[in-house]
Image (cartoon, rainbow, N blue to C red):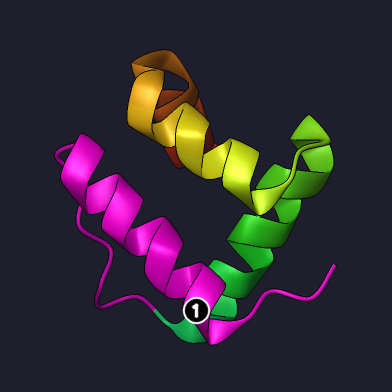
């Protein structure tokens, strides 16, 4: 899966809006790896992941811990 700059932006916005975490200063490479890992490990699309972040605090905490 190829993670785009737009994907990173959507991921960061969802995390910031739905949790106390703000990772906007982290490196782009780091987030590309993190997003790819979350999507692969959970066998989900980006849209599904964003919905989970918006509606499932346990999922959000899990991906942050990992």
Rendered position, 39 above or below 24:
above
Span colored in magenta: 1-26
Q: Provide the secondary structure element on which disc 1 rests.
A: helix
User: Could you say which quadrant of the image residue 30 lies in?
Assistant: bottom right
Residue 36 seen in this snapshot: yes
Tell whether 30 sits left or right of 57.
Answer: right
Task: Specify the farthest residue to the left.
Answer: 20
Which residue is labeled 1 in the image? 6
Q: Residues within 10 Å of mark 1 (few under 14, many from 20)?
A: few
Residue at 32 percent of width and 49 percent of height:
14
Residue 21 position in % (x across, y down): 21, 47
Tell whether 54 sits left or right of 31.
Answer: left
Residue at 41 percent of width and 63 percent of height:
10
Residue 66 position in % (x across, y down): 56, 38
Residue 28 position in % (x across, y down): 49, 83
Q: Is residue 9 magenta?
A: yes
Residue 64 position in % (x across, y down): 43, 39
Rendered position, 52 above or below 48:
above
Residue at 28 percent of width and 63 percent of height:
23
């Amino acid at each position: 899966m190829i993670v785009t700059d737009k994907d990173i932006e959507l991921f960061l916005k969802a995390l910031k809006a739905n949790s106390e975490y703000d990772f906007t200063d982290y490196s782009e490479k780091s987030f590309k790896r993190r997003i790819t890992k979350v999507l692969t490990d959970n066998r989900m699309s980006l849209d599904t992941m964003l919905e989970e972040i918006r509606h499932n605090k346990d999922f959000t905490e899990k991906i942050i811990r990992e």
